[in-house]
Image: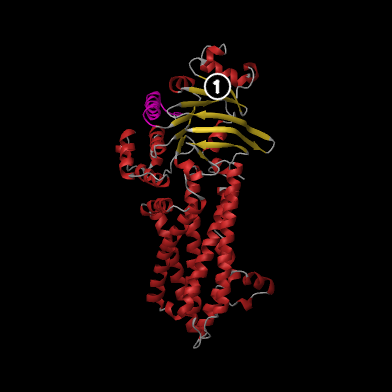
């Protein structure tokens, strides 16, 4: 049985950390602001040089906004997890009645809060400064955000599992995950541009269905809800697999004594 | 019974860290778990805390089987250890609130106030734990450890790195906890004078086995040693000279 009070304790700990720390708060705003500004001007420039019929603001700036949303969701989970790695807090937490599910639920709620703030900031900048109309995506916006949110949580949990299994220094394997995923997800170009082997990987990545649809909408063809359904189903499947993976890694850590011995350096 | 351990065993690869040990801690009792480095004390404590899975045996805390009723067992447990400081980036009050919620403490505000008063932390309540001295951090760790009024309190070298005056205060707090409440205490320490002063009973662990058990005041004489420290050294250097394994 999940205890709301214990989940709230995890969220409260993160709220305390963020409330009193500008170095933690700034990345929520600053990186997305820089991305929106840079890609906003880039989209405007491409609109000018490409001539009529091309709509780079919804196709490119919208895609960057959605990709940043995915990255923020993932980092919302991993950075919250890293806070416990950095403060060597696992022994205190897991010697209490806290369960793995409650702990992960707390991380996910914290991620919802930080990624919602980032999304709001990006929307304001993209809409006010560059005229992006998020509503132009219509009802497809719901599966867009759902797929990217679920896959972001999934990648965050996978990243946390990697660090729990390999030790604190493995966090350097986690930060590049969004960058390594982007080429296969077709954030900036149609999947038809990719060679066959890369398209095979794209087909099993939920975000690729989102970005194909954003381009289709920008080109006036409308979203393919059948494909988006596949994206949602894949995202749910990966989320379940990520939860299973974290639980397996955690159980192994309890069996081997890793949780108790987890310290500031690699424990693998 | 605050704690009942039966046939507890832990193996790492080819190495047996704990050989099927059994012992109890009664309510209002302070039991010292003694032994040289590598004897299996911390392994045993980690298994009781649920952060290390035993390969065999059972652990019952206040009647709740840790393997089958983990939440109920751990709600009745708490601990303080030098190697597990509270997060240094939260204040004393914030840490007590977070851990109070994790342990399901009722009337949490009142209880936090009591702990802050009991451990003389009022002036430090809004200070981040990371900037506190060792002695202050130990007091905060004990405040957290007693926050849920546990039936079983595990203390792994709670007075290590403390000056004698602070250590005396901490010992007094722990004695008061055992005497006034309904909980038992399992205590590890390398300070034999402290153990003799505080513990009602001691268990000597060597190479994963309980070698001796008894009253720390009479046990040295029973084995021809002048004091507990000499007995400790004998256990550490020549465990076989002390006869058959007691438990």
Q: Which corner quadrant of the image does residue A198 belong to?
A: bottom right
Q: Residue at x 50, y 48 (%)?
A: A85
Give A18 or B234, whichever is nearer the viewer. B234
Q: List the residue tagged with mark 1.
A: B213
Question: Is residue A92 visible to the viewer in this orientation of the structure?
Answer: no
Give A205 or A2, whichever is nearer the viewer. A2
Position of B11 relative to B194 (above/below) = below
Q: Residue at x 47, y 63 (%)?
A: A72
Range covered by the magenta-colored residues: B159-181
Give the class, few, some or many, for how many residues have Cα within 10 Å of label 1's Cα (few <14, many ≥20).
many
Q: Residue B147 at x, y = what percent? A: 38, 39
Q: Which corner quadrant of the image does residue B209 belong to?
A: top right
Q: Residue A53 at x, y = what percent? A: 50, 88
Prevalent SS, magenta region: helix
Position of B238 relative to B146 (above/below) = above
Q: Residue A214 at x, y = what percent? A: 52, 78
Position of A3 relative to A37 (above/below) = above
Give A142 or A181, whichever is nearer the viewer. A142
Question: Is residue B212 visible to the viewer in this orientation of the structure?
Answer: yes
Lateral position of residue A152 relative to residue B118, left or right: right
Q: Secondary structure at mark 1?
A: strand
Residue at the bottom extreme, as displayed: A52
Q: How many marks?
A: 1
Q: Residue at x 69, y 74 (%)?
A: A196
Give B210 or A252, whichever is nearer the viewer. B210
Instruction: For the C terminus of chain B, give its image quadrant.
Output: top right
Q: Residue A140 at x, y = what percent? A: 49, 77
Q: Is residue A20 magenta?
A: no
Q: Is residue B174 magenta?
A: yes
| Marked residue chain, label 1 | B
């Amino acid at each position: 049985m999940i205890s709301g009070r214990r989940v709230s304790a995890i969220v409260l700990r993160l709220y305390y950390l963020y409330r009193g720390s500008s170095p933690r708060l700034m990345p929520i705003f600053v990186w997305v602001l820089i991305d929106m500004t840079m890609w906003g001007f880039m989209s405007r420039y491409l609109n000018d040089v490409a001539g009529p019929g091309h709509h780079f603001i919804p196709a490119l700036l919208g895609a960057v906004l959605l990709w940043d949303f995915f990255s923020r969701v993932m980092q919302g989970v991993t950075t919250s997890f890293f806070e416990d790695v950095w403060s060597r807090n696992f022994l205190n937490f897991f010697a209490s009645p806290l369960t793995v599910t409650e702990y992960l639920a707390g991380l996910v709620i914290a991620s919802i809060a930080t990624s919602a703030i980032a999304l709001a900031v990006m929307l304001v900048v993209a809409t006010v400064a560059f005229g992006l109309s998020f509503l132009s995506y219509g009802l497809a916006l719901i599966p867009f955000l759902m797929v990217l949110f679920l896959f972001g949580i999934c990648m965050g949990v996978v990243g946390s599992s990697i660090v729990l299994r390999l030790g604190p220094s493995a966090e350097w394997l986690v930060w590049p995950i969004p960058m390594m995923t982007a080429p296969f997800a077709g954030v900036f170009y149609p999947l038809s541009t990719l060679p066959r082997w890369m398209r095979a990987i794209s087909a099993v990545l939920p975000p690729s269905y989102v970005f194909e649809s954003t381009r289709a909408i920008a080109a006036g063809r409308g979203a393919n809800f059948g494909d988006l359904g596949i994206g949602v189903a894949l995202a749910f499947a990966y989320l379940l697999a990520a939860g299973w993976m974290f639980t397996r890694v955690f159980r192994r850590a309890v069996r081997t004594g890793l949780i108790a011995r987890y310290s500031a350096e690699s424990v693998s | 019974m605050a704690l009942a351990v039966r046939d507890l065993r832990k193996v790492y690869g080819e190495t047996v860290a704990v050989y099927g040990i059994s012992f109890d801690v009664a309510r209002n009792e302070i039991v010292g778990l003694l032994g040289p480095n590598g004897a299996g004390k911390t392994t045993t404590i980690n298994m009781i805390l649920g952060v290390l899975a035993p390969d065999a045996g059972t652990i019952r805390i206040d009647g709740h089987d840790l393997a089958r009723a983990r939440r109920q067992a751990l709600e009745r447990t708490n601990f303080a250890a030098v190697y597990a400081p509270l997060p240094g980036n939260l204040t004393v009050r914030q840490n007590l609130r977070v851990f109070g919620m994790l342990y399901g403490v009722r009337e949490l505000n009142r209880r936090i106030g009591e702990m802050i008063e009991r451990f003389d932390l009022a002036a430090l309540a809004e200070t981040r734990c990371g900037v506190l001295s060792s002695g202050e951090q130990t007091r905060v760790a004990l405040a957290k450890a007693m926050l849920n009024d546990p039936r079983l309190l595990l203390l792994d070298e709670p007075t290590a790195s403390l000056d004698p005056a602070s250590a005396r205060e901490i010992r007094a707090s722990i004695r008061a906890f055992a005497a006034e409440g309904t909980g038992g205490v399992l205590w590890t320490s390398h300070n034999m004078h402290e153990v003799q002063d505080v513990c009602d009973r001691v268990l000597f662990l060597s190479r994963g086995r309980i070698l001796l058990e008894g009253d720390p005041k009479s046990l040295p004489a029973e084995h021809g040693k002048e004091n507990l420290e000499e007995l400790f050294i004998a256990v550490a250097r020549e465990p076989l000279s002390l006869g058959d394994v007691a438990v």
